[in-house]
Each structure stands twice: as structure tokens, then as C-alpha cells.
Amino acid sequence: MHHVVLFPGVAAVRVSKRPSAAAELPRRVEVLRAVAAAGLPFAVPEPLTAVATFGERAAVAVSWIDGEGLPEGIGDPAAFGPLLAALREVEISPELEAVLHEPRRYADGVGWADILNDEVIPRLPTAWRDGVRQRLDTLLALEEVPARLVHGDLGGSNVHFGEDGKLTGVLDWDMAIRSDPAIDAALVATWHGWDVLRAATDEPTYRRARAWHDAVGVGHLHAVFAGKPLSHVDGFVSSVVAWLQERGY
């Protein structure tokens, strides 16, 4: 969604690529402000400037976060357990509540589960439809839990560690929502490994994370969490099919 110009040790400047990203940038900046005020025990990018607009683009400078992400399949449960706990324990302030949406499960307008049931599953190859629908039903049958701060893209280059191996900060809060903390747990597992997650959290969270992941892949869900029609349904379905093939379903 953005080009990023890096000024190491000073700032990162995000420049939108498309009008839709430019339109969303002011809200995303407010998300950063609210998250930065939440008292998390690690750094998050804080806006250093107002959002500047030029033509159909927009840009903002945010504070620099030291460290680097970990390679795929690498992760220390001693780091990710406290990270997940810190996110789960954030008090949802009025400022956070105002800028974070909570995905709708069922038809209220259009819910994310309705999009999967009505638009995605019917387009899947026949052999996979029943299995995906059953796993989605399992997910929807989970007991409701209080909605908490969910990063929405936790893992990879978004979680930075210093040379000493300690967590320094978490970047890219564009997909942050209020929902089940097990979503972030599943995202950690898909990059760093399910064994890492099992050692980092409790068994109920692990089971919920599996349920969030097993339907169509937790990384796909951000595209439907807004409750809006998919802009590129065929591309989304192709990505889900590739994920199903990789999983061996």
C-alpha cells in the first residue's frame, strides 16, 4: 500500500501508492497515536509529522524502530509469550475504540463470515468446499471472548529484535482491529512455527489460534474483516486455493 523511505535511526516516511491508501492514511496515523499511548512494553512507530497530501498521494513520517525481524521458522517463545500477553492486556481506551473496528461475524450489513460463505467457498474447486465450510463452522462455533487489541499482521519483518535477541518494537499497525487475541497468536505461528506458539501460550489460546487458521489461512482474513465486498474475488480465491494445496487438504 505504501512506498517507504528510510532514514536510519531517525524516521521512516510512508508514501501511499494508491488513492485508497491515501484516504486511509489519516485514520492509520490515529491508530499509531492511540497504540503509542497504550503503554506497551516495546516501541511502536509514532507519527512525527502531520499527513501531507499531494495529488492523489499522501505521506507521513513516523519514528524509527531499531532492530530487525526474524527469519521464517525462527522464534523464541520467551519473547513471543510476553508480546502476545502485552497485546491481550492493553486497555481499550476511547481513543483506540474510536479508530479500531471490530469484525462482524454474522450478517449486520455484511459480515466477514458471510463473505466467505457466499462469495469465496462457492468459487473453490468442488473437492475443497465442504472441508472449508466445516472448518469455518468450527471457527464460528468458538465461544466468544472479549475483544482486545489485535495487531493483525504479527510476525516476519513487523516484529523487531535487537542484536541481544530482545524485542525492540512492533511495526505496521495498518491491520489492527479489536477481536480475538488468538488471531495474533495464529499469525505468530504461521511465521515462527506452531511449536513456538505452543510453548509461548496456553492450550486454549493455541486451540483457538488453530481454528482461526484452519479455515482459509489466518493471513487471508484481513481482506474480509472490514465486512466489505472483495474487490478482487478471483485473486483472493486463487490465493486461498494455493494455501489449501500447500496444506495438502
Image: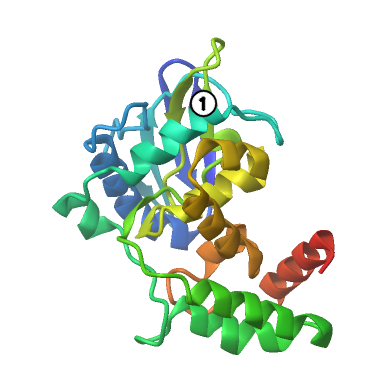
Quarter occupied by the C terminus: bottom right
- Asked whether, in this view, residue 232 is left or right of residue 37, the answer is right
Looking at the image, can residue 18 be seen? Answer: yes
Q: How is the image coloured?
A: rainbow
Looking at the image, can residue 5 be seen? Answer: no
- Asked whether, in this view, residue 125 is left or right of residue 100, the answer is right
Amino acid type for the residue under numbered disc 1:
Ala
Q: Position of residue 158 (x, y in %)?
A: 53, 36
Q: Position of residue 63 (x, y in %)?
A: 36, 26
Q: Position of residue 76 (x, y in %)?
A: 59, 27
Tell me if residue 141 comes above or below residue 204 in the rendering.
below
Quadrant housing residue 215: bottom right
Residue annotated with mark 1: 78
**Neighbour class for label 1 at 10 Å: few (<14), some, many (≥20)?**
few
Tell me if residue 172 comes above or below residue 27 in the rendering.
above
- Asked whether, in this view, residue 203 is left or right of residue 82, the answer is right
Front-most of 14 and 33?
33
View extreme (top): residue: 164
Give SS at disc 1.
helix
